[in-house]
Image (cartoon, rainbow, N blue to C red):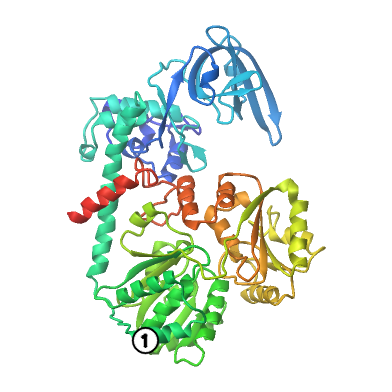
Amino acid sequence: MAAAGGNEATVQSPTTWTAASPLTVLPGVGPVVARRLAAAGLRTLRDLLQFFPRRYRPLRELIAPVADAVGTLVRLQGTVRSVRSAWLPGRRSMVTFEFASADGTPFHAAFFNQPWLRKNWPPGTERGLEGQLERDGRRSYCGKRALPLPMAPDRAPCSCVIPRSRAWGRRAWWSGSAPCWRRSIGRRCRCRRCRPDSTSCTLPPRELFLAMHRPTDVATHERARLHFAVREAVALFAAVEQARRARTARQGWSFATDAPLAERIRARLPFALTADQDLALAALFGRLRGPAAMGALLQGDVGTGKTAVAVAVALAVLARGGQVAFLAPTEILAAQQAAAVAAWLGGSNVEVILLTAALTRAERQAIGERLRTGGRHLVFGTHALLSASVAFACLALVVIDEQHRFGVDQRMALVQKGKDPHVLVMTATPIPRTLALTMFGDLDVVTLRSRPPGRRPVPARFLATDRWPRVLRSIARAIRRGGRVFVVCPAVGEDGEKGGVVRMQQVLATRFKTALVHGRLPLAERQAAIAAFARGDTDVLIGTTVLEVGIDVPAATLMVVAAAERFGIGQLHQLRGRVGRGRRRGLCILCGVDGERVRAVSRTHDGFELAEADLALRGSGELLGTAQSGFAELRALDPVDDLGLLLRVRAAVRDR
């Protein structure tokens, strides 16, 4: 049989399939398609059986379109009356069919980039379609915003539900020949002559798989989904609990913080702590006493003062002779943190060190020698801290800022430079409760919610791209009032890239005093541009997402994000946190194309609420791995809706 992609595939009889059979046994799955599936983690029939549609929605079988079904999923049968096609820019096409239903009522269906359908479905052809019923003027459409799914000519309706699309790679789960694969799954689930193997005995009953892939109704699917969700939750929390017990079994350094030391630490900070910060500090001081190594997550919204808490914890360790490594995601952030903390600790016996790749080799070697000989060292650095040439005499605390910017392997590379050091990870992107239970279930979670006095929330407003002249007027008004302006773009804009800061500066420099910052510039140039902006030598700082964290300019009152739809919710929330840090109120303008993420950030300034919205839109990621998006590990468990289930399973696993 000819396989997809023009390759030949040897198709085995279904009676010889096992759970370990490669996907190439399926009709239409040749080497090309198999490679694409393997990139999504699908290699065997077991993988495919466990690759469940995200959810099912009720589907109505109709004789003809009716008004009360508009907006619902329907199945319609019709005869092609006419067909017309149109070519769009970029060699794209749209083929639109008019069908006549059984009672003669017309309805339409449009297919994007499938020009061959005009030849395959001539007038008089009978076809069945599944999709959302929509109205456009007087016309009824079976699928328009989301393309309809044709039923195979020989396929009888099998259920009254339809799967919600599940994405893998750049294509939807039901795109291409996926309907064929779903029918193959159904055959596999029903086949009672399949040869058993050493792995298939661990599979749940085939009826549960059939209910997941081809349920007869939503209730049947939900019962099967809960079965698989519980299995996933048990496996997930078993791994989390194993990690937690392994950490608590390690003997950690003991750093007792008495009242006089705590007062001296607070006196070193240039501002009074909020009640939240005091509570967080007391909790973390308690963890430093041991006996186990501390593992804590310090989370808080933008501007809640996480860095001050982390520095106070570091001072408690430094006071007892330990060394502290502070890992930051960017050189700009590391440099600013090192400069600020060095000013706080002026006249103390703590040596504040900055270690980044921008230093010369001789400078890095000299720093490495000081760290190996010991002393009260507080080292701020980027990935340069992870180098094998960097060693510590007594690394007792590791602080990781913006932990989501680093992979698991990178975080562990720094931790392993000490002997069971205490670990504090921080994030200004609040973690949804479900992810805190899973991804950070082995850590003690400490949360900051209140902002220091005078720090007010920054509203975000959306303006479509065609309203750019209004954005320019807002920039001019902010500058006239004595403020400064950030403008952030999603790309550098060199070598023909669209949406870049290079082109943006060329446009804005004709009207304002501007400076440019992006990751391809040398660190010295970036720091000089930021310093000029902070002094007021320039009014507008144009940059990429290097401006997302660590830039503290109290005079900045306006943040403009161009092509905002290309940024994530967390990025947009972080960017707006760069303004309104002084006496004047801040404003963030999101310019571009409207969408769910832009609307979410415009609707609320609560980072915890935004984190939940981001989880629902983007996925939970490989919770125990290194990926940051997608539901790769969770096939049936929904981390948003199944919170109650997660709590019950976690309690049961901990009690075992």
Q: Name the residue at 20% across, 40% down.
A: 198
Q: Position of residue 297 (x, y in %)?
A: 38, 65
User: The C terminus is located in which quarter?
Assistant: bottom left
Rendered view: 618 above or below 154 = below
Left or right of residue 86, residue 600 in this image:
left
Quarter of the image for residue 194 reads top left
- How many neighbours does mark 1 have within 10 angstroms: few (below 14), some (14-19), or many (20 or more)? some
Quarter of the image for residue 589 reads bottom right
Secondary structure beneath disc 1?
Answer: helix
Rendered view: 85 above or below 22 = above
What kind of residue is marked 1?
Leu
Q: Position of residue 223 (x, y in %)?
A: 29, 33
Q: Position of residue 637 (x, y in %)?
A: 34, 43
Quarter of the image for residue 109 reads top right
Q: In this orientation, does residue 307 appear?
A: yes
Left or right of residue 206, residue 448 in this image:
right
Q: In this orientation, does residue 321 appear?
A: no
> Which residue is tagged 1?
261
Q: From the viewer's side, name the closer residue of 601 and 31.
A: 601
Q: Name the residue at 76% across, 52% down.
A: 470
Of all residues, the one furthest to the top in this rendering is 103
Q: From the viewer's side, name the closer residue of 206 and 387.
A: 206
Left or right of residue 377, residue 219 in this image:
left
Q: Position of residue 490 (x, y in %)?
A: 63, 56
Rendered view: 277 above or below 34 = below
Rendered view: 170 above or below 63 = below
